[in-house]
Amino acid sequence: MNWLTQDIPGTGGVYKQTPEDFQVEEIPLYPCSGEGEHLYLWVEKTAISTREMLAQLARSLNLKDRDIGYAGLKDARALTRQMISIPFDKFDQAKNLNSKNFRIISFSRHSNKLRQGHLAGNRFTIRLDKTHPQTQERSEAILEQLQRRGVPNFFGEQRYGVLGNSAHLGGLLLQRRYADFCRELIGDPELIRHTEWQMAATHYRRGDLKEALSFLPARMRDERRLLTQLISGQEHQNAVLSLPRNLLRLFLSAAQSRLFDQLLLNRLSGIDHLYDGDIAVKHVNGACFRVENAAQEQERVSAFEISPSAPLFGTKVMLAEGQAGQQERDLLDAEELTLKSWQIGQGLTMPGERRALRAAIVDPRIVSCEKESITLSFTLQKGCYATSVLREIIK
């Protein structure tokens, strides 16, 4: 089974033809107090990633990366609105700031810096084009079932990088295959469309590192850093571990995500059904507990109080027992990994956690429906992706 709503045909269609076709608005976790040392910026951006926007802010306001706070990363290929925090003493500079890719809508003041995860969720407004003539009827039926049973809590494609290999890179790190990691980071020439990057990857695979470096685009700072280390005589392990910690953690997180997505796919038809030995997640606070009697707890699942979960593997994560636990252990064996594989050290060790197999969709509705197009709106909690909803609708 590829979809939870397997019995309802999809709408087909495409999205992200323009940034305005995919709109995301962050829902703040708390209101600003109106006083304090931090300035909160309500920012609208278009066709730029959150990381790129933060880098522009840092340069324009003469700030260090650690001075800027944000709650979540937003897609580059979209029109998004989100909160950013900076020191209040930058107010005069910030109010006169101009950029072609983002604008500051409003300013607020608060006592603490904004931290990752400090958001309640996101509201999405998404337009699909080139859809089936029966799109409205199909969308209504799919959204009704998702609201009742939950949205499969996949991470999806946006987690896996431009070449779709971020999870593979994370897996190579976990297996300590550093030479293979370098090869994969520089990229497969057959998958690269950028001419200079493709030439660099081709020369790297031929073993000509200096020639590879000469072709590698200047903006690819991490790849250039890796090649420079190797050319200087560093071992592959040292060259890899010299890369920024946040980049390596991103790859490790992508590996966690891929394994979670696989376990979710295995249980897709039963994301609203518990088994004895499952680890259930309480939606109200994220707390986990082992299910001793699934039949007794099933009513709470139907009420969307709790849900079955799967692991984001790590050194301290609790694994399920019974049928679900066997699937988790079998997947680790197939990947030639153990929980100790995530004990990397040097700031890279991942403790792991449990993630619910499903997410609640709030206020799903059809904004408009025209010939061969439809605009949908819905809210998801933080950490859940709109592509999981679109996956079910479009099929």
Image (tube, grey):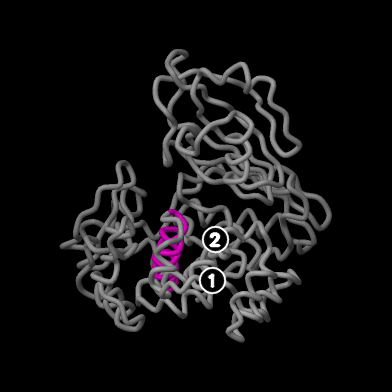
Q: Which residues are magenta?
A: 246-265
Q: Amino acid at mark 2?
A: Asp
Q: Position of residue 218 (x, y in %)?
A: 67, 59
Q: In this view of the protein, which residue sits in the foreground, 41 or 215?
A: 215
Mark 2 residue crowding within 10 angstroms, few (<14) / some (14–19) / many (20+) = some
**Residue occupied by mark 1:** 185
Instruction: Give SS at disc 1.
Output: helix
Residue 164 falls in which quadrant of the image? bottom right
Q: Amino acid at mark 1?
A: Leu
Q: In this view of the protein, which residue sits in the foreground, 385 or 390?
A: 385
Q: Give the residue furthest to the left.
A: 292
Reply above or below: 140 against 62: below
**Residue occupied by mark 2:** 222
Q: Position of residue 206 (x, y in %)?
A: 61, 86
Q: Relative to 131, is 288 on the left or the right? A: left
Can residue 268 be seen from the camera position used here?
no
> Residue, x 32% and y 63% (percent of image)?
311
Q: Relative to 327, is 42 on the left or the right? A: right
Which secondary structure is most common in the magenta stretch? helix
Q: Dividing the image into 4 quarters, which one contains the C terminus?
A: bottom right
Q: Position of residue 16 (x, y in %)?
A: 72, 54
Q: Is residue 394 magenta?
A: no
Looking at the image, tell me whether mark 2 or mark 1 is earlier in sequence order.
1
